[in-house]
Each structure stands twice: as C-alpha cells, then as structure tokens.
Image (cartoon, helix red, strand yellow):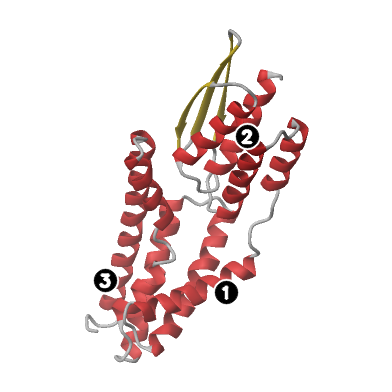
Amino acid sequence: MDTDNIIHIAADAGKLMLENGGETYRVEQTISTICKTFEIHNVNSFITPTTIVISINNNGETVSTVRRLTGTTVNLKKVSLVADLSERISNKSIPTSEIKRELRYISTLPPYSDDTVLISSMFAAGFFALLFGGAFRDFFISFFIGMLITLNGRIFKKYNVNSFFANVCGGFTASSIAVIAHHFNPNFNIDKIIIGAIMLLVPGLLVTNAIRDTLNGDLISGISRAVEALIIAVSIAIGTAIGFKLFIFILGGTL
C-alpha cells in the first residue's frame, strides 16, 4: 500500500473533523485508526486548533505531511460521518479510492440553509429567555433580537468581518433593544431578555472541547481553545455593556 497515499487520506479525514468542531483526541484517534488499518503502526500526530502534523514510519520509510486550517465552524454531522467512516475502515477493507470519494462527499455536504438557521436561532433565543425565568412577553423580544443577531452575523461573515467585532455588535444589539423595550414597557425583564439572546453567541462547544482536550492531556489545544472562548466572552460582555450604558443614558438614565 502506498504510504504517501495513506497519510494524505488520514490527514484529510483529521482536517475535516477538526475544522467542523471535532475534539483533538478524536482527530488523533481517527488518524491512528486509518493508518493502523493499513498496517502502519508507527504513527505520530501533533494536533492544534489550527494545524495538523502527521509523521508515519513504514518499513524504514518516513513520510510527513501538514494541514493548515484557515477557518473553523460547527457541523457535528460531518464529524459524525468521518467517525463512522473511520470505524467502517477499521472493520473491513475499503479501497483508498472509495475512502477518498466518501471524504470528498462529506466535505461538500451543504450546511443548514440560511432560513433554517434563522428560524432556529430566533426560537432558541426566545426559549432561552423563558428557560432563565423570563415571562412569555420576554420571549418575543428575545425572539426578535435572535433574528437581528443572526442576520447581522450573516452580513459580517459575507464581508469577512473580524469575529471579535461581530460578537461586540451582537452583545450591543441584545442589550440596546432590551433597554428600549423596558423603557416603553417596564414589565419586560431586561436581564432575562439579554441572557436569552446572547446565548446564541456563547461558545458552548468551544468551552466543552477546551475542557475535554485539557483533561485528555492535550494542553496546547485545551489552552488555545480556552483563550479563544475567553476572548469571545469578553467581546460579548463589551458589546452588552456599551449598549446597556449608552441607551440608559440616551433614555434619561433610568430604567
């Protein structure tokens, strides 16, 4: 079996998992499984949130490759499909041409449609407001804010706006509309509305992966993800505070 061919298949599978939200240990496990299935047992991989480095030794021949990630997203369906493919490879002999074909198919799977994401985000924001103790009237304000945050995020992504600024704007949108709504109707709960809306921006998967990577001994990945999550949290807090303070001042300094 061509060693060069195998290492590139393993690297492509690992990259596909990592750039769609997979944990570091799962990426390493997938790379190792694919290589060992093809009788390559001396496998070393170094994984960070932005880089994959693989080196294998087979019959005295050492081959290495690097994959650089330029952007990440969250699509756990792709992570699951690659994991299933890895398991099938380990259970039976699959030609490398078929593996490549399946990896190409998984990589080209379209994400959820914009309308699906928009509707889901709106309902998620509204129900988060209810979950945190808000009244049913708060649901509709968070519902509306969720729509604005998602539409703004779509525009920012189109023009490659820095994610820090995008999260600042998301927090600003949530707090400013909540303050305005409370100004015209004091029965609205500002805190519940804001919390429900900004839950769309909270990096839950990132925090989870940071903890799991750290517990699994992948300290570089764990710390990197934790720092990234902290920066996102700070950006949300900055935007929320600016909107909150600014509109309280504009509306007369009272709630």
- Residue holding disc 2: 12
- Extreme residue toward the front, this view: 91
Q: Residue at x 51, y 70 (%)?
A: 121
Q: Position of residue 140 (x, y in %)?
A: 45, 85
Q: Earlier in the sequence, mark 2 or mark 1?
A: 2
Who is closer to the viewer here, 185 or 47? 47
Amino acid bearing label 1: Ile
- The vertical placement of 42 against 138, above or below, is above
Dot 2: element? helix
Write down the quadrant of residue 217 in the picture: top left
- Residue holding disc 3: 245
**Within-10-Å neighbours for mark 3: few <14, some 14–19, many 20+:** some
Q: Quadrant of the C terminus?
A: bottom left
Q: Is residue 123 visible?
A: yes
Amino acid bearing label 3: Lys
Contact? badges 2 and 1 (CB < 8 Å): no
Q: Nearer the viewer, mark 2 or mark 1?
A: 2
Write down the quadrant of residue 242 in the picture: bottom left
- Residue holding disc 1: 119
Write down the quadrant of residue 56 in the picture: top right
Who is closer to the viewer here, 116 or 61? 61
Q: Is residue 177 visible?
A: no
Who is closer to the viewer here, 130 or 97? 97
Q: Position of residue 38 (x, y in %)?
A: 65, 25
